[in-house]
Amino acid sequence: MTIHKLDLLQPTTLEEASALYLEHEGDASFIAGGTALLIYLRERFYQPGYLIDLKTIPGLDYLRHEPGVGLRVGALVTHWTMERSPLVRQHAPVLCETYREIGNVRVRHAATVGGNLAHGDYRLDPPAPLIALRARARLVRQGGEREVPLEDFFLDIYTTALEPGEIVAEVIVPDPPAGTGAVYLKYQSLSAMDWPCLGVAAALTPGADGSVDDLRVVLTSVASHPVLLQGVNEVVRGQRLTDRLISDVMALVDDQIDPTDDIRGSVWYKREMARLFVGRAIRAAQQRAQATARG
Ligand SMILES: Cc1cc2nc3c(=O)[nH]c(=O)nc-3n(C[C@H](O)[C@H](O)[C@H](O)COP(=O)(O)OP(=O)(O)OC[C@H]3O[C@@H](n4cnc5c(N)ncnc54)[C@H](O)[C@@H]3O)c2cc1C
């Protein structure tokens, strides 16, 4: 039997981590919580010669709120921290709710916010509410950095906008306009700890007269990457939400998703559920916005 040799590299800065990756390009992988990567290594789907441990870089596990900027979440913050943070609960409660529903407590203790995004699995939960809230990722590589809105980050199954050697360093979640209600509905057709059959996030900002000023709806698990539903504001902006208007938004779903048959449901079933959950998510976001307005 061939024993696969694997070197663990332990950088202390993002620059160094990126440089190590580029030095061993094609034979290296970053590792954060290891919850996804170690499964691939164990199953031998993937056999890099070098693992570059991001956890040896100090100062990547911060979580703070800056007025005018929003929540700033270091890439190594765990799902467990996100679900329990009073700061996240205050500024983006939908994120506490979303991270709390991922996998099981052992996974959530190890898995990181940056690793989740970089993983690029088409079924991930957090991208839906993060995109609904207009979050962006700060990406760092040797010699530079850039910010990418998360709605442009996911390109295909396991394919993101990350360039070779680029690291998700931070996620920035801007404060939504006052009165915004945001929700994420995860629908699991198997068990309560399973990946989603599908998920829908909605963020609704009401206008002064109770009409809709802005509505963002994002679906996960129903295409090769998260889907920010197009054409929604053309239907609802400036109007009070009615069942008829919500039905008109639900009618946008079918042409914009591309689900696959799997153990969690057939294509037909996922299309039906996607429409249904979009309607539910919009109503839930409206209720949350109304509750926010009442204080
Ligand atoms: C049993 C189980 C159930 C799960 N259920 C769900 C679920 O229901 N919903 C959901 O959303 N997720 C779910 N997950 C996925 C879980 O959230 C991911 O495993 C996790 O997000 C990956 O994070 P990690 O820190 O462990 O990354 P790792 O496993 O360390 O890395 C994952 C990938 O990202 C790369 N990477 C890691 N960090 C960075 C970074 N900062 N910059 C660039 N590249 C990086 C690695 O090279 C690797 O390719 C589940 C996982 C398990 C094991």
Image: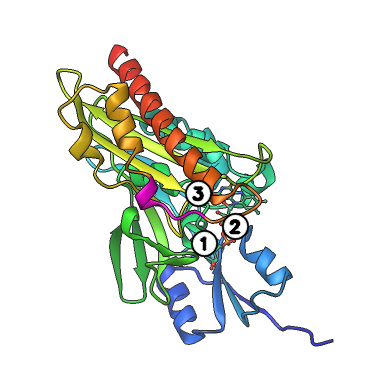
Residue type for callout 2 = Gly
- Labels 3, 1: front one: 1
Q: Which residues are magenta?
A: 254-259
Dot 3 crowding, Cα within 10 Å, few <14, some 14–19, many 20+ = many
- Judge whether 229 appears above or below 237 on screen: below
Q: Quadrant of ligand 1?
A: bottom right
10 vs 166, left or right, is: right
> Which residue was labeled with disc 2?
33
Q: Is mark 2 within 8 Å of ligand 1?
A: yes
> Which residue was labeled with disc 3?
77
The image shows residue 136 at horizontal and vertical percentages of 32, 52
Q: Residue furthest right?
A: 1
Q: Which mark is residue 119?
A: 1
The image shows residue 193 at horizontal and vertical percentages of 66, 40
Q: Residue furthest top?
A: 294
Helix, strand or loop under label 3 = loop
Q: Is mark 3 within 8 Å of ligand 1?
A: no
**Residue 63, magenta (yes or no):** no
Residue type for callout 1 = His
Q: Is mark 1 within 8 Å of ligand 1?
A: yes
**Residue 258, magenta (yes or no):** yes
Dot 1 crowding, Cα within 10 Å, few <14, some 14–19, many 20+ = some
**Image quadrant occupied by the N terminus:** bottom right
Which of 293 and 278 lies nearest the eye of the viewer?
278
The image shows residue 239 at horizontal and vertical percentages of 18, 25
